[in-house]
Amino acid sequence: MSKNAELDITNRRTILRTLAVGAGISTAGCMGGGGSGSTPDYEVDRQAPARLELLAVSFPDEITFGETFSGEVSLANTGGDPITSDARIGIRPIASDTTNQVIDLNSSGLESGQSRTHSTTDLAATQAGEFIIETGRRIDSVNDELENSFNINPIESELEEQVETPDGIRLTVNDVTYEQALLNESRSGGFGQSDMFYSVRNTLEGQILAVPRLTIGNATGETIRLLNKESSGRNTLSILGGSPVTDIDTVSIDQPDIRGSRIEPGETLNGIIISEVSTDDLGDISLGLNTGSPEGEIDIAVPLPESDGIPEFQLVDSTTPSVRQEGEQEYRFTIENTGNADGTFRGAVRYQFTEDSEHRVGAWVGTWSDWDRYFVQDIAAGESETVSFTSNSDYSVKYELMPLGETFTTTAQ
């Protein structure tokens, strides 16, 4: 058996059936040459030139990513002359055009009608997914009973359990939270008072943001980069069944988005990924790591537990001045958690100048702008808390409390 070699594509064909463990039925022709088991029926034409037929390939029913495994391959000479050269078959992921591994087979010396079974060892499950068997050098035909696909299963891990890929990527999913909204921080200006402004990324009804916290260590000996599911390359992180959220710089979570990060050899990085998922799917979603091609299957899957409950927030009271007064003015909002779990309310304020400010601010009138006012407030289920901000604007301004959608206007005197 030879790993990472090339198939002789001058005689390469993909077998169009599915891989079976060799069936125990009688053979036509002579047995010999080291066969360790029975092989399917095959016909021998002793008037024809030497002809090598692939009879059977068998692998274990359960193979998991990262394991080594063995199998058996049976060949027969269905022609009249002896076989004078060796053969080769390949293993290829169905999602790829590249042969993953090859198996060299000793077929030289097979006489007419003779069969031979080879034991193959030290095959490596280098990625998960469906694989097919391809014929390569010297194989002339395949038996009608041969099936050619088999599966390599992903590693399934659990929260707080470290799992390591054969290459040396160490993944631990420490915990997961489900958030109704997150804050996004960007650089700009608001009323000339700040270089930063804040917006809210919230979800549609029936959706929630899943935020797993991860630790990833690099024992590969080379720099690795973690990518999004839509990116091209290896080492992609995703939440199966979710839509990735990548356009957000979270200000209210203590760890950064880990996707896009580079991890040097020997380094360990802590971070999060964010994905929008259906609340109906909670309990059926997993975090996945694909170490191979983007088209490949997930190699490591960590089921994410269902939330014990979901916080939901409503505005129940507000105090907002309608007329501008001298100095700082305070705006107060009472927020109630009407959900069935404790949670963190994350909100922000945006503004626009009203028409009676047009002579002062011109083109800005009627255009929403994000601002530097935001809120992060823990609220227990069934309880209420008050959040507030201040403003000393000299203009007539319309405000909106995001993500609750409450608008209010303060008019300059």
Image (spheres, rainbow, N blue to C red):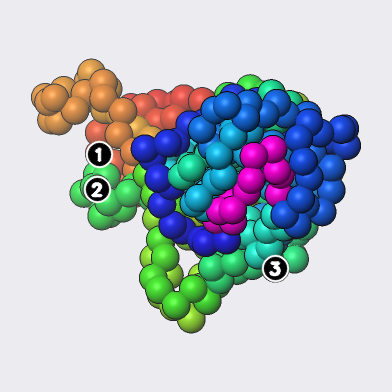
Is residue 374 at least partly visible in the picture?
no
Q: Could you tell me which residue is drawn at 84 percent across and 48 percent down? A: 37
Residue 322 position (above or below residue 106): above
Residue 125 position (above or below residue 348): below
Q: Residues within 10 Å of mark 1 (few under 14, many from 20)?
A: some
Mark positioned earlier in the residue sequence (3 or 2): 3
Residue 295 badge: none
Closer-to-camera residue (282/42): 42
Alpha carbon distance from label 3 to label 1: 57 Å
Mark positioned earlier in the residue sequence (3 or 1): 3
Q: Which quadrant is home to the C terminus?
A: top left
Residue 188 badge: 2
Mark positioned earlier in the residue sequence (1 or 2): 2
Mark 1 — residue?
A: 394
| CB within 8 Å, label 3 to label 1 | no
- Depth check, mark 1 against mark 2: the one in front is 2
Position of residue 208 measured from the top left corner of the image (x, y, whole percent): 64, 34
- Depth check, mark 3 against mark 1: the one in front is 3
Q: Where are the magenta residues, as a range?
A: 103-116
Position of residue 22 measured from the top left corner of the image (x, y, whole percent): 80, 39
**Left or right placement of residue 123 versus residue 384 in this view:** left
* Element at label 2: loop
Mark 3 — residue?
A: 162
The residue type indicated by label 1 comes to: Asp
Is residue 263 at least partly visible in the picture?
yes
Alpha carbon distance from label 1 to label 2: 20 Å
